[in-house]
Amino acid sequence: MFYPVSFIKITNFEFMLKEKFSNNEKKKLLKHFSNINDSVFAITTSKQVDRGALMSRYSRTDKNMRKVFLDEFLKNQNRGEEFYKRVLLEYGDDSVAELGSAQIAIEGLSNIAVKKIEDRRIGLSYLEKSSRYVSWDKKVNGKYKFYREPILMKSRFADNYLDACNLDFDLYTKNIQPMLKLVRENDPIENYKFKDHDGVEKKFPLLKNESDIKSANMIYRAATKAKALDALRGLLPASTLTNVGITGNGRAFEYLLIILFSSKLTEEKQLAVKIKRELDTTIKSFVSRANDQYGKSFQKYLTAVKETSSNLAKTHIHDKPILGNNVKLVEFETEAKSINSIITALIFEQSPSLSFQQVFQNVKKISKKSKMKIIQRLCRIRQNRRHRPPRAFEMVNYTFDLRTNFGMFRDFHRHRALTLGRQLLTTDHGFDTPKEIIELGIEKDFKDCMYNTKHVFQQMRRKFPEEAQYVVNFAYNYPYYMRFNLREATHLIELRTVQQGHPDYRKVAQQMYYLINKKHPTLSRIMKYVDLNQYGLERFESEKRTEEKRRIG
């Protein structure tokens, strides 16, 4: 007999649901769940700890969730806290801490502290204030917005530190309008096309409608402002205060707190206290161990690892720092081996009950020509940038040795599906001078600012190596490495070469592509949407699309 799908769904659910709720129970449940009669429902009860505990308890009983809630949670207002105390503290089941989540905002933290926070890759998501759209020329109570590091402020370096940071901001602020004027002279609005109210692309002088002219000016002003601020951001010191919003689960927040509590920097320790205090208002049970006996033991372990690493470096590493920037592919496999791994992983899921090893041995027997056709087929069926390559492409890895300006590092640092290692920020590797700085005629002022920073930094680093980071400008080159698979490489390189990207990271991403293409000419074809062109106003087309959506919607 044929039954409608909807009927089957209801019948099956009713068959599985053993408990029947009274009208009074239904009334109570509807205050805590989105519905009481469907197999899919949202948990709407207000207490985060109860939501997480309920989900975890749910995995340890034959009862349905709503029955568990009636029997255990409505009868005991502290049931959630008691559950997590037992499971986390007594049993050490960390995974249940992922069932609670929170959103917090942190305002007025330095670019040193925000990078430490954003080092946490799993379980946390971030949105940070942009140096491209927001200028840092405003003062609060007559002071520029940069972090006054307490230890430095009590030291003999206080005046030099303040003078260096103020010099950075003075030069930055002084040149916003001149830089904006230069950008607009180099790329006048008359050279660009805009859509009129009929959707026809026209150069600016040919626009007649007042609304079209207003819209074009908005697009142009936004694109040129971004260009100007991009050119000047290298002047900003790492002490520059920013804002960040964080969404994440309890387990990830707990680990973040442990990291911050173990820091040598006053700012990061103080942030740990403040973040813990705020999380205690929403997901207290999930982060309870961050600074207890368990947390302090973890902090001690992290400190020991750091000290071990430092001692090894002092004992075995004796080379001198290299000036300038650098992009090198330092670790990779042969393309033939990589292709075998990808094809094996690709067809493994559809292979009839065979082991990975069996599939691999069969793949090795496929002719080189046939393997090339398989890769080419995968490349052809990928139709746009958001069509991620299949997971099989995660079987191939690359390690890049990078030295780029710190401002650019901040952009690459946002990618989390990779392994990234970095050092303390220094002035050891020189700095980048944007061509717009030279064109504006302020190269000498810019370099004087950088040299002053280096002088102050060298004075402070002998006694305060970590605190000295705060004075270093975004323009200074910064060493780090990134290891990622081909699937992530495709995402990163395609994303970071889009037209609207910052010219610094577009150049580096393009270099990455060339290096991968040289070693893996066949596999690199999967990166179909790498933009290798150069542009004037990088943000122009993006701002046009944004304005078009605004006018339509």
Image: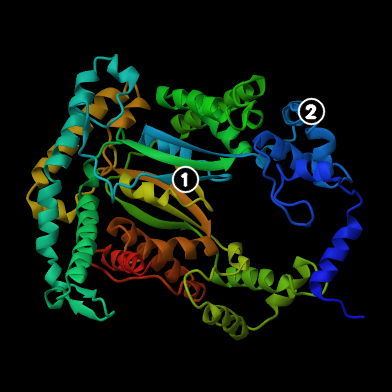
Name which of mark 1 and mark 2 comes first in the sequence. 2
Label 2 CA crowd tier, 10 Å (few <14, some 14–19, many 20+): few
Q: Residue 323 is drawn in which quadrant?
A: top left
Residue 140 percent location from the top left of the image:
23, 29
Residue 317 can be seen in this image: no
Residue 49 percent location from the top left of the image:
68, 34
Front position in the image: 480 or 273: 273
Q: Which mark is residue 76?
A: 2
The kind of residue tagged 2 is Asn
Tell me, what colour scheme is on the image? rainbow
The kind of residue tagged 1 is Tyr
Q: Is residue 29 above or below residue 314?
A: below
Q: Which mark is residue 126?
A: 1
Residue 10 can be seen in this image: yes
Quarter of the N terminus within the rendering: bottom right
Front position in the image: 356 or 254: 254
